[in-house]
Amino acid sequence: MKTNIKFTRRFLLLVLLIFFTLPALGQEKWREIDLRVNDIGSGTSYSTVIKKLGKPRRRGTEKFDASSACSGSAETHLTLFYSGLEVILLGDGRKGSLDVYSIEVTSKKWIVSGISIGANVKNVLNRFREPNSKEEKSGETILYYVTKANLGVVNFTSEAINL
């Protein structure tokens, strides 16, 4: 009986070791890039956005209760619209500030970390190196990167970079 208990304990320990190390084996280090427009990037505060970009042409606000928000607490999404630029800030119930979590550029007027609309694939690859993944879809090439601190995904499409 004592031998059976030792075997069971060892077997259980082995199973637990395998269980807890498997997620680490599957993790991959992603190439992170720090994208900024006029020094505005992920995590930038609302006051800094206004200071750097000025008053937006218009703004929109969406509120989500805790049950429908990703964070598990009430959220506010504030979208600031500039000509050729859309900046979305997120505020959740845990902290009172609004911080950038999304930027969409649709005009050559805005330069994103040295790249603007109309840049070619070579320019993007020279600036950010190899993407985390690359996809060919319906005649378009899509280059995928991850933002600094893995806060989100960035993609450059052939439509946006003139392939």
Image: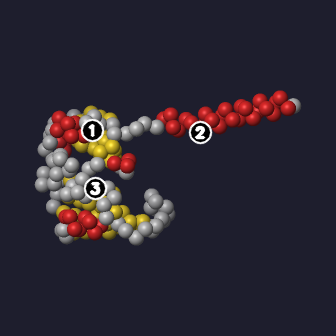
What is the CA distance from the residue labelled 3 to the residue labelled 1? 19 Å
Residue in the picture at 26% in, 66% down? 48
**Is 151 positioned to the left or the right of 21 in the image?**
left
Q: Indicate which disc, 3 or 1, sits on the residue closer to the N terminus.
A: 3
- Find residue 20 and report its image quarter: top right
Which amino acid is tagged 3? Gly
What is the CA distance from the residue labelled 1 to the residue labelled 2? 33 Å
Q: Residues within 10 Å of mark 3 (few under 14, many from 20)?
A: many
Indicate whether 75 appears above or below 31.
Answer: below
Q: Can the viewer see residue 137?
A: no
How many marks the image carries: the answer is: 3
Residue occupied by mark 2: 20
Labels 2 and 3 touching (C-beta < 8 A): no
Indicate whether 117 appears above or below 84.
Answer: above
Residue in the picture at 28% in, 64% down? 79
Residue in front for this viewpoint, 51 or 71? 51
Which amino acid is tagged 1? Leu
Say which mark, if any, is on residue 143. Answer: 1
What percent of the width, then of the height, locates residue 24?
51, 37
SS at circle 2: helix
Say which mark, if any, is on residue 41. Answer: 3
Residue in the picture at 46% in, 37% down? 27
What percent of the width, then of the height, locates residue 117?
15, 47
